[in-house]
Image (spheres, helix red, strand yellow):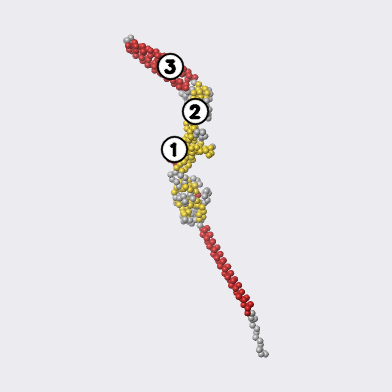
Amino acid sequence: MTHGQEAPAPGPPTPPPGPRRGRGWLALALFVLALVALGAAIYAGIQDRRRADANLKRATDEAAVPSVVVARPTASAPADELILPGTTQAFTDAPIYARASGYLKRWHADIGAHVTQGQLLAEIETPELDQQLRQARADLDTARANLDLARTTAARWQLLLKSNSVAQQETDEKVGDLNAKRATEESAAANVNRLEELQSFQKVNAPFEGVITRRNIDVGALVDAGANAPGRELYRLSAIGRLRVYVSVPQTYAAAARPGTAVTITLEELPGKVFTGTLARTSNAIDPTARTLLTEVDIENPAGELLPGAYVVVHLRIERPLRGVNVPANALLFRSDGLQVGVVRNGRAELVSVKVGRDYGRTVEVVSGLGPNDAIILDPPDSLVTGTAVRVIERPAGKAAR
């Protein structure tokens, strides 16, 4: 450079060749990594939003499907147990009357006494009857004496007739008198037998084995045999070793009340005690007032635990020709198409028309329209229609319907 020329302006400093170039690449790498991280974050956010949208859509779809509680029907019993009130009565029950009039001398059995057939119950004093018997016997003696005399006279006159010592007319009169005296003697003997029979009724005996349930007399009481006035009942005797139970069966079950059917009987005062009997006979007529059939059940009572006149509960087993299934009462739908039940088939609701048998209160018998394996919808909403998709919730076994 010559003297007088200006020196050139200095340019930017030139970085050193090695260290300056390394720092630039590092910055670029950091920038690229930041871009990658940002992209990953943006992608993850988009995926989360997509999953959230999918979950929301799934939850919305699930919420749109109604949940229903279902239960399975139970098979109906092959027979029904008809529970009816009944009244017991002694198999043999008879009032005991006197056959002879007089005064009670003494009695030998009181209420509650168990007596055997022929046992002496009471004794009656019959002074008038005794006097009549004495008079009748005296009349019988007179008639026999007259008969003996007439027999002797008739034999004598018949002997005299052979020698023509007497007339035929007189002989016939003597024979006729003999026949009349014989009839008089027989009448007097019959009267004596009658009075002796009446006198034997001074002692009142039990006509059969049983229990004295009533005593209406006492010593010294006037006893009237009922010739001129209604007789007075002395005792009431009941045979309680076997009882009759009368029960009125509703007309609906009258055809099922057949003689020979086994019956069980219970009493409230004897919990846990069950008596067995047999339906012996029916009246074969419906009471037009109560619309019931009177039936009689015979039951053995050797220990005397059942008392005549007691109120009992009769359990009568009625065989059922038609069987169905039992469903909870809260499964029924009352629609214009009739009575229906909602069932779940292939994940969808279906309304089935049913025919109801007996109503048990909490459950109802369905005789047609349902099978034992159908899933029955409990408390179905009024908006339920056939074809609606539903989500099933099984009711726990044994849980009672509301």
Q: Is residue 342 visible?
A: no
Residue type highlighted by circle 2: Thr
Residue beneath label 2, please? 116
Vertical relation: 133 (above or below) 75: above
Residue 249 location in percent, x, y? 46, 39
First in residue order: circle 1 vs circle 3: 3
Query: Are the residues tagged 1 and 3 within 8 Å (C-beta)?
Result: no
Residue in front for this viewpoint, 52 or 339: 52
Q: Which mark is residue 328?
A: none
Residue beneath label 3, please? 140
What is the quadrant of residue 191 in the picture? top left
Instruction: Label 2: state its secondary structure.
Output: loop
Alpha-carbon distance for marks 2 and 1?
A: 31 Å
Residue density around tag 2, few if under 14, some if 14–19, many if 20 or more, within 10 Å: some
Residue type highlighted by circle 3: Leu
Instruction: Label 3: state its secondary structure.
Output: helix
Instruction: Label 1: state its secondary structure.
Output: loop
Residue 202 location in percent, x, y? 49, 22
